[in-house]
């Protein structure tokens, strides 16, 4: 009986140890599987957040599109087509006559082509002679009051005045679409 008890005890202990081994293996496998799935879940969550932000940005852009189109249409009204710049020298001559200024105008070699979202420009040099007040009115109208051409002066040199006619030399750009 002692022997049978010993065998039953060893069998019971073996079964318990085997159960622990199998349970340990199952827990180890589940833990590894969970860690792997947790990593995938974290990656998927990050990707989902990025997609969500992209969708939000796209929605914002779609909401802003009508306003951008309106602004672009307004800019197109302000900027002449490149072919319309042929009229710039005639317009300049008219503005100079109204302001009693004689003008010497020339296109410079520098040209920036128009792009879809950016205006193009032609560089020009301009020499003007007249009274100081007339030159001031002429350049103010040229750069600030024109409703036909968008002009920017990059440099400006002024000489003379007093009793003699004043002379101004300017370098600038006229913009087009």
Image: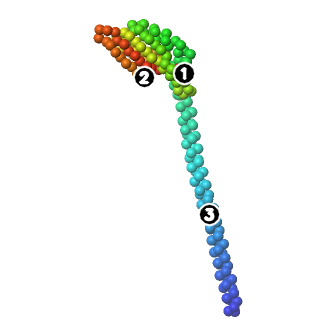
Q: Quadrant of residue 23?
A: bottom right
Q: Are marks 2 and 3 in contact (CB under 8 Å)?
A: no
Q: Earlier in the sequence, mark 1 or mark 3?
A: 3
Q: How many discs appear? A: 3
Q: Which residue is mark 1?
A: 177
* Location of residue 152 in the rendering, given as x and y in whole percent from the top left corner: 44, 21
Tag in front: 2 or 3: 2
Q: CA distance from mark 2 to mark 3?
A: 69 Å
Q: Quadrant of residue 165?
A: top left
Q: Earlier in the sequence, mark 2 or mark 1?
A: 2
- Residue at x-position 53% and y-position 17%: 80
Is the residue 91 above or below the residue 26 in the image? above
Name the element at disc 3: helix
Name the element at disc 1: loop
Residue 70 visible? The answer is no
The residue positioned farthest toward the front in the image shown? 109
């Amino acid at each position: 009986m002692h022997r049978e008890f010993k065998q039953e005890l060893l069998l019971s202990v073996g079964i318990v140890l085997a159960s622990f081994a199998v349970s340990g293996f199952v827990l180890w496998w589940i833990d590894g599987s969970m860690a792997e799935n947790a990593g995938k879940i974290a990656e998927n969550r990050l990707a989902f957040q990025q997609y969500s932000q992209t969708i939000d940005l796209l929605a914002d852009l779609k909401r802003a599109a009508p306003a951008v189109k309106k602004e672009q249409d307004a800019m197109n009204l302000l900027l002449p087509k490149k072919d319309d710049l042929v009229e710039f020298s005639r317009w300049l001559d008219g503005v100079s006559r109204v302001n009693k200024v004689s003008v010497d105008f020339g296109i410079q070699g520098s040209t920036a082509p128009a792009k879809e979202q950016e205006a193009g420009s032609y560089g020009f040099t301009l020499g003007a002679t007249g009274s100081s007040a007339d030159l001031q009115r002429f350049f103010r109208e040229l750069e600030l009051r024109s409703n036909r051409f968008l002009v920017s002066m990059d440099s400006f040199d002024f000489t003379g005045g007093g009793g003699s006619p004043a002379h101004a030399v300017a370098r600038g750009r006229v913009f087009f679409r």
